[in-house]
Amino acid sequence: MRLGVLDMGSNTIHLQVVDAHPGARPTPASSQKFELRLTDYLDRNNHITDEGFDRLSHATAEVLKHAEEFNCEEILAFATSAIREADNGEKIIEELQKVHAIELQILSGDEEAQLTFLAARRWLGWSAGRLLVLDIGGGSLEMAVGNDESASSTISLPIGAARMTREFLTGDPYTAKSIKALAQYSKDIIGKSVSGELVSHNADRIVATSKTFRTLARLTDHWYKDGGKYLERSALNAAIEKLKDLTNSERTELPGVSQSRAKQIVAGAIVAESVMKHLEIEKVEICPWALREGIVLKWLDWMEK
């Protein structure tokens, strides 16, 4: 069956066309995405503005055309942190459903963490043992730990890379004062919120998913030749020192850093370092599967019942 997985994230509107069957590995067939940092379209009342809705609706129309061209039999559409945290998020979803005739679900932070955990578990297999999974998106940080296909403990914090860039970082290059303020805030909210089983995780494998961690791993490999499949905290700290002194245009010249990501990679790196330090993690393994794959796998499991 050909599925269209439509991810309305904080950074992008991304359609992944996937050939998927129960018992088989999901195979990507095509993708289309629009860079759209929804957190940039929040007003003082934490509402997504009319301009933000118009851009979101236009991107949705375009990716749905792409899905039709590739003969998708089912559209699995979901929204994450930026729409979830907006005070008019439910209204935005209602309007999108009405205009585009699709079913669109807002994932809770727990659901997002659980689905990402499922994807990592299926990718790594049962032999991986107890897993700790970290995921930094544009709007939020998710963490999950457990022995099974469902995590036994999860948390979602609104400290994603795009959100933290918008709320804290100023100047170009970013000012030392704004970087320090973000680092302190990240440290404080993680220290206050992340406890219990997540701290005493006793994980056999610690993995990180999604674009922020993949980009950071690629950068540290570029600078320090550490292989790209892992991200070490020592290399991350060194990378932060380099990144914070670069302008946005200079960061776009780095491998794997697009113009839109160049603005937020510093914030993403600071949040990553904060959570790794709090959990006393020296190295994370990069997992290629994340939320979109988790959505497909969960849907296939449901189809088999």
Image (cartoon, rainbow, N blue to C red):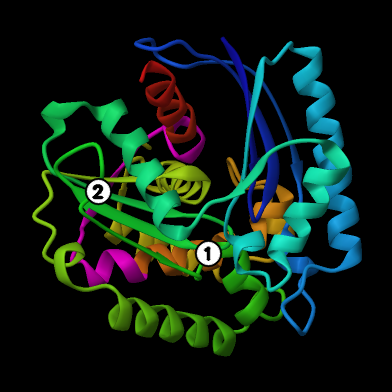
Q: Quadrant of residue 190?
A: bottom left
Report the magenta residues as a range.
274-293
* Residue 261 percent coordinates (x, y): 65, 53
The residue that mark 1 highlights is: 160
* Residue 155 percent coordinates (x, y): 34, 64
* Residue 305 percent coordinates (x, y): 36, 20
Amino acid type at image mark 1: Gly
| Mark earlier in primary sequence (2, 1) | 2
- Circle 2 — which element? loop
- Circle 1 — which element? loop
Q: Is residue 105 left or right of residue 146?
A: right
The residue that mark 2 highlights is: 151
Q: Quadrant of residue 102?
A: top right
- Residue 280 part of the magenta-drawn span: yes
Amino acid type at image mark 2: Ala
- Residue 88 part of the magenta-drawn span: no
* Residue 189 percent coordinates (x, y): 38, 81
Q: Residue at x 73, y 53 (%)?
A: 93
Up-down: is 243 above or below 185? above
Dot 2: within a 10 Å radius of its alpha carbon, few (fewer than 14), some, or many (20 or more) residues?
A: many
User: Which residue occupies the foreground of this view, 284 or 119?
Assistant: 119
Q: Which residue is drawn at 75% across and 21% down?
A: 67
